[in-house]
Structures are given as structure tokens and as C-alpha cells.
Image (cartoon, rainbow, N blue to C red):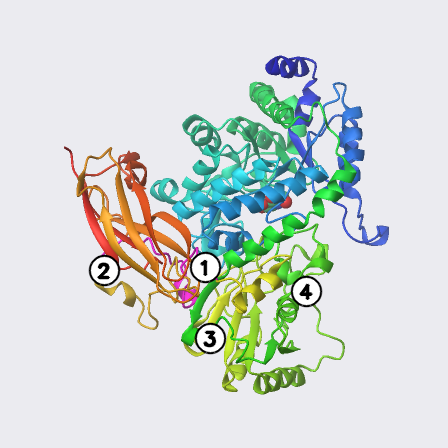
Amino acid sequence: MTDERIETLLAGMSPEEKAGQLTQYFYFKLPGEADPALGFDADEQPRAAEAALGRGGAGALLFVTDPAEVNRLQRLAIDGNPQGIPVLFGFDVIHGLRTIFPVPIAMAASWDPETIERGQTIAGREARAVGIHWTFAPMVDITRDPRWGRIIEGAGEDPFLGAAVAAAQVRGFQGGGIIAGPKHFAGYGASLGGRDYDEANISEYELWNTYLPPFQAAVEAGAGNIMTAYMDLNGIPASGSHWLLTKVLRDTWGFTGFVVSDANAVKNLQTHGFAADPADAAARAVTAGVDLEMAFSEPAYDHLPAVPAARDAVEVSVRRILEAKLRLGLLDEPFVDEDRAREVLADPEHRAVAREAARRSAVLLKNDGDLLPLDPGAFGSIAVLGPLADSRRDTLGPWVFDFDLAETVTVLEGIRRATGAEVAYAQGVPVTQREFPSMFDQFGGNRPEDPEGFDADAEFARAVALAESSDVAIVVLGEHQNMIGEAASRSSLDLPGRQLELLRAVAATGTPTVLLLMNGRPLDLRWPAEHVPAIMDIWYPGSQGGNAVADLLFGAASPGGKLPFTWPRTVGQVPIHYGHTRSHEPQNQGRRYWDEASTPLFPFGHGLSYGRFAYENLFVSADTVAPDAEVTVSVDVTNTGARPAPEVVQLYLHQRHGRASRPVRELKGFSRVELAPGETRRVAFTIGPQQRRYWHAAVRDWVLDTTTFDVWVGGSSAAELATTFEVRDV
Ligand code: NOJ
């Protein structure tokens, strides 16, 4: 029945209509009025898209979030092709549509797949309500280079955590009613020098062991779409790689959804110096396995009807696009209910989940003398300082477009609402005085301007004086949200501008100081880590960010997030990650540089809470197991502290010897638990062949060695409680 419906549609389509189904247009009105003198035409893209809809030349659109517009454009689409096939609306729903959740790296820092899934279910629900069918998310690219701006969109450095976060997001989005599109397939996070879009050269060993597992997990979770990557992978543009898009994705993993190119990536096969011209680019992309071309303008796929060699591939791809439309119910109900959209977007439950997610994603990096949570008896006056303390736009983070600034709660507002203490505020310094171009500036409101008549030195002095006269100083520093993200790489990890200078001056007053970081990448915290008693990474915490941060500061909730990446001391250590091999002279691995330690400032998996955790009774179910058998590792975790608190129990493995040198530690299990004071929980992990296998560079396949495994369990990758088990042919 299903197939019949699709086959009937296919049989009635002209080659041009088929190519149209395989084309996705941006529907993107530039801000500002048309100015012919400057050659500026704000409506160029919408006009091209509408013309394409009118001739059956577009199968999908992106960037429309207004349900009335969705309905209007859908009508154009349906009337524009003889079979009345509706368009798919896609969008970058990255960390929320109207209700904005913490940025993806922050959600990953919760190490809490349930919260991640719940958040993306809400994002999916809001998106579907306005008429969006599919999101270009999650980004599941592993990255070990924080210079790369897109580190903020992923789950960090680790394939095991990355796979769990990827699967949770796919379940969430799709549970909310939209198709998930894991991206960017594959290897984008390894772009050379952290420079966005530059080539990635990744060995087959690293690809299989590190970069591909989150994609495979996303496919296994049922993702309906995959987006290709912009860059060249080992010399071949990822968007033209038959090996990636067909051999690995479909033949090996059994992916049955549709593949979309990243924006303009099909035409770019020519600019890469790969395809000869747009027609060649189109033919090579579609035969490699790109079903849908996402195009800024003049799609390469317009050439498909003239390329006979692409005919079979086109048939297959059109079928996949129609299947997606059918499965979404679009062929029967293409329009959206505008009243219902308003209702869903206003659901207060969505805000409550966002607040909880922001609480769970914060990472308490340091808390000397238990300065946090703040004792209301001791701190009658609070100075809230720093350029990010009261910036609504920055609180939301990048990659949001449909947000409501009026309902966004900044850290300053959250603190004011939560406490009876006297709260004074000074910006102190701007984040930066340097101009930095951002591709998202066109959306406006990115950079808070210095207030009118801003006197930099007087403002600096005012902030320090407030710190001096208050019982505690809370300093909110970091990067503007548009200093990170796509095309926002940095060559430095310093706190921009005079922020460190402000922090030093505040700390020098002797007033207890709390540093809150708003960021999506690790920054150079060598000085604060030594001199500031309490440091909490709050990331870009989203619309409810300020409320959540206040919950944590005053102890209504305990932080419990853990770092999803290794925090370097300095940019000179980059790339650095915990899962390296022992290599030569492992005893000197912390001294590989003569001018700086080669250890991290904070290890992967690190994060404190308001509890204290003791780990005891680590047991393995068997000392010896066969290669295909499982063992169970269990441990008792006790909260010996005085407050209820979460802990992420982490399990790391190390293979002592075998057919390859394996990493010193690899995360192979984790579980976030919440323990009352004095409570003990027995936490168990199953370690089977899946967790022990690895891709072998010479065998060119997954292998399992007979060997001895070290096991560590604890609260970070520096866990010390250890045991072993042996894998032997029995
Ligand atoms: C380019 C980005 O690389 C991709 O992640 C995004 O989904 C598309 N643009 C569409 O906005």
C-alpha cells in the first residue's frame, strides 16, 4: 500500500520534478530593506525559493519558523507540482526552538541521557507544532580541538559518551515528532588546526574507533536523516564520498533514511577541485549517496535531468524523500494548526524542563572551603559583576533564532529573584573591545553594546569597589555567544579582553570570589584555578539559565555535571585528550613540554558537587572470561557529605597488551545517580565484547584480544579505585 502510493507518484513525475524533489532551498529573508544602489536584495532567496516551488522545483525548504508562512508556502508547493506533493520543512533546531535549553556541549556535560532526551523531545514538539518536520541535529562530531568553534555543538572528545548523547538526542527529537539529522558525516571535528571547514586527515583506525561510533549509535537509534560534512576527509570531499555515504552508512550500518548535503556542499564539490562543473558535482553527489541537495541558490541538482548516468540514483533518492514525507504523515496532512502552535510554544512545562537541564549541566570545577552553596547568613550583600552577568542574548548561546528575549533570565536576574540579600551589579569590562566578524550578525542582537557614555576605567573601578564593599563577588566571564559556533574558531583560549584583569582586581580585594564561566569551549584558566576559590562552568544555559544558576548558587540544587572534554592549561597543548596511548616513556607523559606541564588543568569527567562521594567494594563478576562473554563490574558509592547531591559514576578500561597499543583509559560505562547524605548505592556495569573490541588498522576490522584489562571506577577519568579481569580462550 505504502510502496504503491510512492510508486504511483514516481511514475507520474517528470525528470525535472524528480530533481526538484531532491532540492532543498533556503527561505531566508535578509534583514534590511532592498537597496538597488548597493545591489542589496533582501528577498533574493525567498523569491528564488518561491519560483522553484511554483514549478515543482523544490522538495524541501529551510529556515521558516512561522506557522502561517509554513502554510502559505506549503500551499504554493502543493499547487506547484501536478501530483500535489508537499515540501519538507527543515531547520536548525539545535538546543530548542522557543524554549532554549543549554547548548549541546552543556547538555552533554550533564552525562544524563534522560535529561538530554527530554530536552530534545520538547524541542521537537515545539518545532513540529510550528510546521518544522526535521532538524539538522544532533551534531555528533567528536572534537579534541577547542579552537574549533563548533565544539559547542557536540558532545566533546569521547566516542562512548558521544554515542550515548547522540542516541538520546535522536530518540528525543523523533519522539517529539520530527526527523533527526545527525551531522556532519564524517570527521568534521578534526579539521586541521581547529580551522572551520579545513580538511581533516584521520586514519582509518581513528575513524572507526573515535569519529564514527556516535554516528553509528545515532543510526541504530533510528535517525531518519544524515547530513554530510563540508570538508575533505583524507583527500575526498565528504559530500562526494561513496565510501562514507553508501559503503559505511548504508551497506555496513543499514541506514534506510535520506542523506542531505550540508548547505551548498554539492556545488562545492567543484570549488574543492573535485568535480569538473556543477553537472558533474550533481552526478557525483547523487551517485555517492546524497539524496537531497541543500542549496543557497542555483542548485547543482537542476542539472540532474541532463545527466543520464545519474538516472538510477535519482530514482532511489526520490523514493527515499517520498518515504520520509509519507512516514511523517505529510502526504495526508501537510498543513499546520496555528492555534495549536501558539499553545505548544507557551507550555510552562517546557520552561521547567529547561531549568532542570541547566541545573544538571553546570560543572563545578573548583570549590575550596565549600564556598558554594552560598550561606545566606554569611552573605548579606552580593556583587554580581562581569559583562555576561546580565546579557540575555549571551545567556541563550548560539544557534537559536526563534527565542524570546523578554522571557530569558540572566544570571543577575536569577540571583535577584532568589535571594533576599542586597545585590549590586556592574559590568566592569566589555567582553572585548576588538571587532570580530560573525556570520550570525545578520540575525541582530548578538553583541551587547557598551552603554551610552561608557567610561571604561570608571566602570572597571566601580566593579572593583562593589566587590570590595560586598560580602561575596560573583563574576560572570567568558565569550560572547557569537565568538563560538560555526566559522568562529580562535587561535587563543584566553578570556577575551580585560576580563582576567577584572577578575584579578576583584580577587585582590579579599572578598570571597566565585567565577561563573559562560562558554562553550575550555578557556585558559591557569590563573583563576590557582587563585579563585570557586569556579563553576554554567555554559550558555538557555532561557531559564539565570534561575537555574541561582538554584545552584544558593543550594536549592547541587551541581553534578562533568567535563565532556579534557580542559587544557593552554592553547599550546591542543589537541589534548585523555584516551591517548602510553607510547614511549609513559612516565614522562606529564612532562612532554619543557615550558609547561603536559597534563590537563581539569581532567575529562571532572566535576564536583555539594556532596562527597566514597567508592568502595569494587568487584568483577569473574576473574577470567571468554572473548565473547560479559563481565559485570559493580561498586558501592556513598554520599559521605551533608547534602543530597548527584554523582556521575564512571568506568574506564585499559587493555594491557594485544595486537595494538590501546589507550591508557577509555570510558566504557557511566551512570548519573542522586544520593542523599549517608546513602549508599550499588552501581553495576556490564562489560561485554562490544566494550572491549576495537578497530585494528592492519586487520581492517574489529578485533577482540585475549589479554588483561584494568578497570577503574570513580568520579572522573583520574579515578583511582581499580581492579582487573582477564580475557582468555576457555
Ligand atoms: C551549515 C552548517 O554547517 C550546518 O550544520 C547547518 O545545519 C546548515 N548550515 C543549515 O543551516
Q: Position of residue 691 (x, y in %)?
A: 31, 41
Q: Position of residue 534 (x, y in %)?
A: 47, 73
The residue that label 1 is drawn on is 560
The residue that label 2 is drawn on is 586
The residue that label 3 is drawn on is 371
Disc nearest the viewer among 1 and 4: 1
Tell which of 521 and 29 is nearer to you. 521
Q: Check disc 2: other Cα within 10 Å, few if <14, some if 14-19, many if 20+.
A: few
Q: Is mark 1 within 8 Å of ligand 1?
A: no
Q: Is residue 570 visible?
A: yes
For the residues labelled 3 and 4, the Cα–Cα distance comes to 32 Å
N-term mark: 3 or 4: 3
Q: Position of residue 529 (x, y in %)?
A: 43, 73
Q: Residue at x 52, y 48 (%)?
A: 115
Do the residues under discs 3 and 1 have CB atoms within 8 angstroms? no
Q: Residue at x 47, y 30 (%)?
A: 242
Q: Which mark is residue 447?
A: 4
Q: Secondary structure at mark 1?
A: loop
Q: Amino acid at mark 1?
A: Gly
Is 208 one of the magenta-colored residues? no
Q: Check disc 3: other Cα within 10 Å, few if <14, some if 14-19, many if 20+.
A: some
Q: Check disc 1: other Cα within 10 Å, few if <14, some if 14-19, many if 20+.
A: many
Q: Which stretch is magenta?
A: 559-584
